[in-house]
Image (spheres, coloured by chain):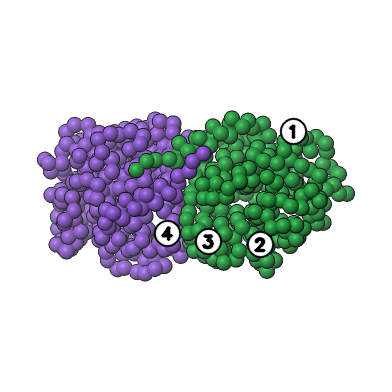
Chain colours: A purple, B green
Amino acid sequence: MSLLVVGSVAFDAVETPHGKIDRMLGGAATYFSVAASYFTHVNLVGIVGEDFTEKDASIFRGRRVDTVGLERAEGKTFFWAGRYSENMNERTTLATELNVFAEFKPRLPAAYQSPEHVFLANIDPTLQSSVLHQVKRRPKVVALDTMNYWIERTPKELRETLRHTDILMINDSETRQLSNEHNLLRAARHIFTLGPKALVIKRGEYGAMLVHQNRTFSVPAFPLEQVHDPTGAGDTFAGGFMGYLASVSRLGDAELRRAMVYGSVMGSFTVEKFGLDRLRELKRSEIHARARHFSKMTQFSL
Amino acid sequence: MSLLVVGSVAFDAVETPHGKIDRMLGGAATYFSVAASYFTHVNLVGIVGEDFTEKDASIFRGRRVDTVGLERAEGKTFFWAGRYSENMNERTTLATELNVFAEFKPRLPAAYQSPEHVFLANIDPTLQSSVLHQVKRRPKVVALDTMNYWIERTPKELRETLRHTDILMINDSETRQLSNEHNLLRAARHIFTLGPKALVIKRGEYGAMLVHQNRTFSVPAFPLEQVHDPTGAGDTFAGGFMGYLASVSRLGDAELRRAMVYGSVMGSFTVEKFGLDRLRELKRSEIHARARHFSKMTQFSL
């Protein structure tokens, strides 16, 4: 019943066809923690600068998010700026200022060192490995996100981290790049030789697919008439997925499927408003109602 | 219990990363008829040339496909040649020789004039309308396919045909082009003002989505390790979909969902081999097994 997340806490500037925000709280670990906190208790490890105020920290208050592991350093918080295309299918990075994140060395407080569930958000694989070295006993589930940057530049380090990963959660182009295979089933088979026992492929507007034990499970994206801001959708998915898994004792096929659905549910809320605006105001009843909606959207009898 | 299809019967030359075939039987109405014949009786209206032999016609024999409406004309059969990209995501048309198809004027034999179900494959919307004019009473379901060519060049004629269409079955780019809307839900709402009451969006490797009565139903594509030839997948989908609908008496939400599944099942077989090679040898037990597989791939309990 303990879920550890290590990743970025950031400020984002985002421009979409629906508006422009110059500065809003973001970062993978932030989206993840807020999403997962609807299901379980989360221990957050990250780093912020002096510009991270009490008001910013209030996103975590009143939720089951422990921020003892959120280090405060001299300097500014990680800043990212991006613009989405008219169709939201492409995004252009306008600025990436690592700031304090450049010196991030994740340190797990004593109380965090025996997590049952770990999510290593998209950061340098060497840092991801260093987190696992600080963990005192093998967690039940280690899940990991990564991106093209690390696949290209630190393949050796990424492979070492993957050896200790149970569930890899990446998008389809990363799946293809990592495996050097266009076909997703063959790509998954290759990835399983690297360590992970399950692969979650995030496919944006097309939903998500789970591959494990020669089985696949697919869940569509929730059809929305307005997508305001896709930022954080993938990390929110991961938060719903891991938050749900950490909240149940079994780890079987039925639980993994439900985790896929709750991941999709949470991701679908995030994109409805800018940044964390929709996620922060969510009610549990809304989560359950949307999960039932996913059920209606996919179920059939033969 | 009668299903009419009007569309092309053709010879195709196809090149994919898995091989090259210089001449094989194809055409929308061919794929549709063979697929639908596993579920119901099909009346086929199309046109072929003198090069269409008894051997070619044997694809329909021993199946529930009536070819009295398959006109034989002087000249050659419609010929299409295309090449698929390495990823099969793109295809380049290398040749389109309309031949006898250029003069195609669909004529319904007397026995075909009271169909309960009609599928108008992708042909000139004026010809699609002419088919409906020959039908003696309003069919239970008129379904229609079209493409960018007609959306751009004959918008007025297409609109007239759509007024008499119940189910429109097109892909996502056609949906967006026809409605001038990127968002598929808003696109569907626009299309419903043109006549159709249901929209089936074919999304290739991402599956298919049904929109009707403010509800959506999604079915993933069947994950295959090898896709040999995507030619005819969409028409096979339509054949499975309409074939199933024509085989049941009710036309409710449950039946439409099952039709989506059987459409996807049939499409997934077609791409396993070149042309009609997989579809022609199918067993009913294989169809039902794969439908159950779709169920396993998508079902979850909350």
Using the image, name the chain to which the residue with label 2 belongs: B
- CB of mark 1 within 8 Å of CB of mark 2? no
Q: Position of residue B116 (x, y in %)?
A: 68, 51
- The mark that comes first in sequence, 3 or 2, is 2
The answer to whether residue B275 is above or below residue B159 is above
Q: Chain of mark 3?
A: B
Disc 1 is attached to a residue of which chain?
B
**Amino acid at dot 4:** Leu
Q: What's the residue type where badge 1 is placed?
A: Gly
Residue A213: % across, % down: 40, 30
The mark found on residue B188 in the picture is: 3
Tag 3: residue type? Ala
- Give the side of residue A135 with respect to residue A91, left or right: left
For this view, does A216 lie left or right of residue B26?
left
Q: Answer yes or no: are tags 1 and 2 on the same subunit.
A: yes
In percent of width and height, residue A234 lies at 35, 51
Who comes first in sequence, dot 1 or dot 3? 1
Q: Amino acid at mark 2?
A: His
Q: CA distance from mark 3 to mark 2?
A: 16 Å
Label 1, label 2: how far apart the Cα atoms are: 33 Å
For residue B62, the mark is 1
**Mark 4 lies on residue:** A224
- The Cα atoms of the two marked residues, 2 and 4, are separated by 28 Å
Q: Is residue B88 above or below residue B280?
A: below
- Residues A286 and B101: in front is A286
- The answer for how far apart the CA atoms under marks 1 and 3 are is 39 Å
Numbered-mark total: 4
Alpha carbon distance from label 1 to label 4? 46 Å
| Label 3 packing within 10 angstroms: few (<14), some (14-19), many (20+) | many
Instruction: Look at the numbered disc 2 and give the secondary structure of its residue.
Output: loop
Separation (CA) of disc 4 from disc 3: 12 Å
